[in-house]
Image (tube, helix red, strand yellow):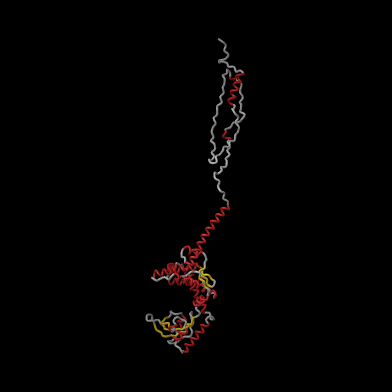
């Protein structure tokens, strides 16, 4: 039996074989080309938005090593691990994207702050001009054509405009409008409830402007004599009105219905002028210098009565300043409480056919003649019949009218 060197056929690895194996291994593990780090800058379309590239896995070829069968692999020399000279990394990791600024297809005009200011100024000026035109038209219409609409009335209430001027003091158009609307409402209510004819608009306007002018003169006269109406005066007077009406709610209801007023409006527009004129009259009554001529006239009339050369009725027609002078000063029958206290005490203290001396009341100087006496048929209360001659004090109303006639008055409204 032939000698057996090994159980398998021995394969000798000669030097050519080792060289061939080495070359095969190097050929498979060594990259074909060196890959350098590359920075890729993609071109971005000016219209389409940039989309980053999708990461993809690169196919990796498996290294195939051809090994020749050897009889004894243990005797095969070890092959050193060969590393590539260039480090290979995935391309995606080194992708650097630089986005370009997208330029607009159409170039927009540049608007600076100066253009905006000019535009805003122009619009604001135009708006103000339009408002000014509307206001001027409404004001002229109110003065010349008696415009009566919401716009005109609002402008008149907001803007201080003159309706008239009395000795340099202005009657405001807002006050005129308020009083005109109040009187117009009052007359329309009266016409509806009592079948009366309301005054014409021109008459109402004339009454309103005259009242406002009169109030200016009244305030001036009161100021000259240092007369004023206090809050307590107004409260006391409104209490009288409430007592007469029955309740405060009743007063409020009447004022709202007839005048569209509150109690405060009634105090200011009615009670205050009324009380001011009363106080002015009291001041005039106590002005001896002002009433010196009145006292002289009353004393002259009394002397004529005592002479009895003329009848009392004739002397009353000659001297009396009361409204009944034309009828000889007759007052007719009256009882206690019908006249002011000073006059009443003097009349009831006379005998029939007798005359009094001068009796001073709030109205002036009286000379009283008692004509007759009786008792009231129903109550039995005493009554007297008398006549009188009245020499009035300087009258507040007469003084107001006198000053009005002397005042320089300008009316700017068209009243007719």
> Which residue lies most toward the left here?
378
Residue situated in front as seen by the camera: 124 or 145: 145
Q: Quadrant of residue 35?
A: top right
Q: Relative to 24, does residue 267 appear above or below in the rendering?
A: below
**Residue 360 in view in this figure:** no
Give coordinates of residue 188: x percent, y percent: 42, 68
Q: Is residue 327 left or right of residue 75?
A: left
Percent position (x, y) of residue 93? Answer: 57, 35
For this orientation, the residue located farthest to the top is 1
Task: Count numbered badges in the picture.
Answer: 0
Q: Position of residue 398 (x, y in %)?
A: 49, 78
Q: Quadrant of the N terminus?
A: top right
Instruction: Answer above or below: position of 17 versus 97.
Output: above
Q: Quadrant of residue 10?
A: top right
Q: Does residue 11 sit above or below 173 in this rendering?
A: above
Residue 44 or 260: which is nearer the viewer? 44
Percent x, y for residue 99?
Answer: 57, 40
Q: Residue at x 60, y 34 (%)?
A: 38
> Which quadrant would residue 194 be assigned to in this image?
bottom left
Q: Is residue 129 visible?
A: yes
Q: Which residue is pictured at 37% across the width and 81% down the height?
A: 377
Report the residue at 53% width, 60% height from top. 129
* Vertical arrangement, residue 366 with respect to residue 169, above or below: below
């Amino acid at each position: 039996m032939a000698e057996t060197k090994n159980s398998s056929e021995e394969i000798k690895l000669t030097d050519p074989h080792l060289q061939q194996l080495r070359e095969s291994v190097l050929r498979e593990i060594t990259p074909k080309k060196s890959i350098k780090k590359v920075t890729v800058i993609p071109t971005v379309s000016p219209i389409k938005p940039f989309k980053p590239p999708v990461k993809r896995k690169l196919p990796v070829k498996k290294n195939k090593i051809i090994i020749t069968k050897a009889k004894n692999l243990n005797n095969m020399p070890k092959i050193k691990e060969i590393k590539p000279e260039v480090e290979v990394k995935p391309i995606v990791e080194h992708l650097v994207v630089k986005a370009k600024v997208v330029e607009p297809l159409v170039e927009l005009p540049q608007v600076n702050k100066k253009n905006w200011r000019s535009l805003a100024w122009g619009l604001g000026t135009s708006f103000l001009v339009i408002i000014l035109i509307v206001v001027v038209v409404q004001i002229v219409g109110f003065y010349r054509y008696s415009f009566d609409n919401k716009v005109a009335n609002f402008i008149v209430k907001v803007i201080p405009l003159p309706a008239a001027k009395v000795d340099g003091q202005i009657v405001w158009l807002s006050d005129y409008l308020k009083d005109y609307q109040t009187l117009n409402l009052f007359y329309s209510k009266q016409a509806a409830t009592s079948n009366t004819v309301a005054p014409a608009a021109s008459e109402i306007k004339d009454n309103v402007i005259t009242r406002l002018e009169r109030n200016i003169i009244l305030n001036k006269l009161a100021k000259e004599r240092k007369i004023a109406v206090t809050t307590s005066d107004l409260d006391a007077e409104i209490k009288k009105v409430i007592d007469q009406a029955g309740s405060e709610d009743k007063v409020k209801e009447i004022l709202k219905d007839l005048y569209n007023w509150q109690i405060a409006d009634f105090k200011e527009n009615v009670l205050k002028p009324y009380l001011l004129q009363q106080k002015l009259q009291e001041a005039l009554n106590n002005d001896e210098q002002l009433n010196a001529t009145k006292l002289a006239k009353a004393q002259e009339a009394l002397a004529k009565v005592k002479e009895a050369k003329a009848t009392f009725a004739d002397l009353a027609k000659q001297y009396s300043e009361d409204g009944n002078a034309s009828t000889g000063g007759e007052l007719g029958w009256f009882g206690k409480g019908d006249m002011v206290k000073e006059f009443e005490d003097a009349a009831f203290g006379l005998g029939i056919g007798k005359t009094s001396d001068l009796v001073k009341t709030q109205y002036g100087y009286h000379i009283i003649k008692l004509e007759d006496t009786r008792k009231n048929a129903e109550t039995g209360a005493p009554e007297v019949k008398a006549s009188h001659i009245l020499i009035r004090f300087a009258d507040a109303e007469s003084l107001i009218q006198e000053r009005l006639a002397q005042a320089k008055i300008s009316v700017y409204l068209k009243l007719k």
